[in-house]
Amino acid sequence: MASINDIANEFIREEIEEYLERPDEIERFIEMFSQASSAMQDISAALIDGDHHTVDELTEEALGNGTEALEIMDDGLIIGMGIVGIKFRENFIFVPEVLACARAMKAGMAHIEPILSDSGIEPVGTVIMGTVKGDLHDIGKNLCIMMLRGAGFVVHDLGVDTSEDEFIEAVEEYEAPILGMSALLTTTMPNMGKTIDAFIDEDLREEVKIMVGGAPVTQTFADDMGADGYGKDALECVSLAKQFLEEPDEEW
Ligand code: B12
């Protein structure tokens, strides 16, 4: 088992000691950070600090040094956002600070987006993606979109706060066989189910495979609302979309 001293970055060690209280979370983050390179730890530290200039510079530098875009996304940006989430949950920081961190995350994503989205392969299928009504969180959805594009999917991004009608109109307009919905709030998760019901009411449910995701969403919740698939991260989002295309008539 790794120890806190296996983490090279002092700022990260201090963040863990000062803000993490649950033993399982302390252990999980020590494990993850100790496995990340010191360059990735520096990116995480800048993100946690809400410093978008430094995230911008360090991401560009890491790519220039040959670090894979996926490694930067997983070991730099997403782990850092995990610490931000805990500090927010425990009321150590508030919306303005989280917005600064989100801006830093986006500064890093701006560099890796063209790489992950540029698959250079023939389009394999069309996906509609959006965050559900009432919900403004888009970082996770945008990561999924990058990865889908990188895997050759054409993705129409409906953005945030997307109504049932907007999802239906987009699926019809683009004749998309796949729809992905994201929700980060327990209060907006039910809007996924409402959207699925709206597809049933319009007699369009058989026309589209529906996948759902977002931090509070679970496989059980997805099953209960009648989604075709649930993905815990952007990689699972891509593999679900691929499965939907490969076996369009299978049960998921
Ligand atoms: C950043 C953030 C914000 C930013 C959002 C900026 C932005 N542009 O997105 C801001 C500051 C605006 C914000 C606002 C609010 N937030 Co907020 N926010 C977060 C935070 C810290 C991180 C979310 C994030 O980006 N995670 C990183 C990404 C990479 O992870 P992800 O979104 O889960 O996505 C991954 C997977 O879930 C999956 N995935 C995502 N979508 C999809 C879709 C499909 C189809 C698939 C297959 C997979 C998939 O793949 C992604 C990549 O791996 C979370 C904490 C947390 N633990 O999630 C709180 C959190 C979600 N927020 C919370 C709250 C309460 C709010 C506010 C209500 C706060 C307030 N008082 O105003 C508002 C709500 C605004 C609104 N109407 O939406 C709570 C929700 C609690 C709850 N029970 O519902 C959380 C959990 C914080 C907490 N208290 O613990 N927030």
Image: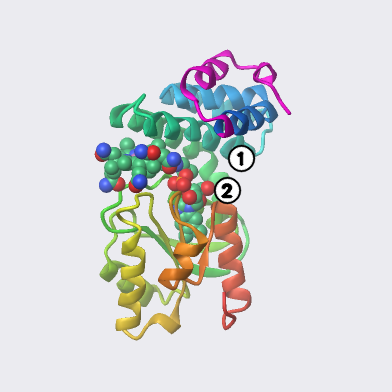
Secondary structure of the residue carrying numbered label 2: helix
Where is residue 111 shown, x and y percent of the image? Answer: 51, 37
Q: Residue furthest bottom?
A: 203
What residue would you read off at disc 1? 69
Quick check: is 15 in the magenta stretch? yes
Q: Quarter holding the C terminus? A: bottom right
Where is residue 176 shown, x and y percent of the image? Answer: 44, 74
Q: Which mark is residue 44?
A: none
Quick check: is 130 in the magenta stretch? no
Task: Confirm or deny contact between disc 1 and disc 2 (CB under 8 A).
Answer: yes
User: Counting residues from the N terminus, which is met first, the one under dot 1 or under dot 2?
Assistant: 1
- The magenta region covers 1-24
- Mark 1, Cα crowd under 10 Å, few <14 / some 14-19 / many 20+, is many
From the viewer's perspective, is 196 left or right of 105? Answer: left
Q: Quarter holding the N terminus? A: top right
From the viewer's perspective, is 30 left or right of 15? Answer: right
Secondary structure of the residue carrying numbered label 1: helix
Q: Residue at x 63, y 61 (%)?
A: 121
